Image: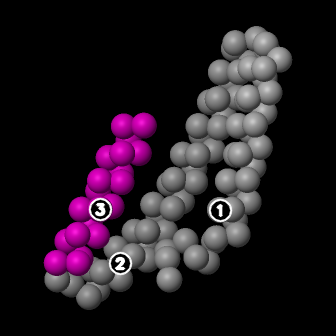
């Protein structure tokens, strides 16, 4: 079981909404909408994706990392390194 399993439907709903926003961006470009208006929507999509990413990260730490740390050993160290790397990727994006 994955850490996000309990919230899976919520994540899928949010991702479908983001997918619709991206299609809207494509339409805006196709229709030659003003640049700033498109950039505003890009920013909204970016924030929505970041929100999903943070939720997934929280679920991962709360479930996968916590479980591995409880068990101990090399798997615990690996899960902590994995979470740290994910955080670093989010910070860079």
Circle on res. 1:
none
User: Does residue 20 sit above or below 31 in this rendering?
Assistant: below
- Determine the residue positioned at 40% across, 68% down: 61
Circle 1 — which element?
A: helix
Looking at this rendering, what residue extends furthest in the front direction?
30
Looking at this rendering, what residue extends furthest in the right direction?
31
- Determine the residue positioned at 58% across, 76% down: 5
Q: Indicate the colouring scheme.
A: one colour
Q: Are marks 1 and 3 in contact (CB under 8 Å)?
A: no
- Determine the residue positioned at 36% across, 51% down: 87
Crowd band around label 3 with a 10 angstrom C-alpha radius: few (<14), some (14–19), many (20+): some
Q: How far, Cα to Cα, is label 2 from label 3?
A: 13 Å
Q: Disc 1 or 2, which lies upstream in sequence? A: 1
Asked whether, in this view, residue 63 is left or right of residue 68, the answer is: right
Circle on res. 11:
1
Residue 62 placement (x, y as % from top left): 43, 73
User: Does residue 78 sit above or below 92 in this rendering?
Assistant: below
Q: Disc 2 or 3, which lies upstream in sequence? A: 2
Provide the major secondary structure of the magenta segment: helix
Q: Disc 1 or 3, which lies upstream in sequence? A: 1
Q: Which residues are magenta?
A: 74-93
Q: How far, Cα to Cα, is label 1 from label 3?
A: 21 Å
Task: Provide the residue designation for mark 3.
Answer: 82
Residue 74 placement (x, y as % from top left): 16, 78
Q: How many marks?
A: 3
Q: Quadrant of residue 23?
A: top right
Task: Provide the residue designation for mark 2.
Answer: 66
Q: Is residue 32 magenta?
A: no
Circle 3 — which element?
A: helix
């Amino acid at each position: 079981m994955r850490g996000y399993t309990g919230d899976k439907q919520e994540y899928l709903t949010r991702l479908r909404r983001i997918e619709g926003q991206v299609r809207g961006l494509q339409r805006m470009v196709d229709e030659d909408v003003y640049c700033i208006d498109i950039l505003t929507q890009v920013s909204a999509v970016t924030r929505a994706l970041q929100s999903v990413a943070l939720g997934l990260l929280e679920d991962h730490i709360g479930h996968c990392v916590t479980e591995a740390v409880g068990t101990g050993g090399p798997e615990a160290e690996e899960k902590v390194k994995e979470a740290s790397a994910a955080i670093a990727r989010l910070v860079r994006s």
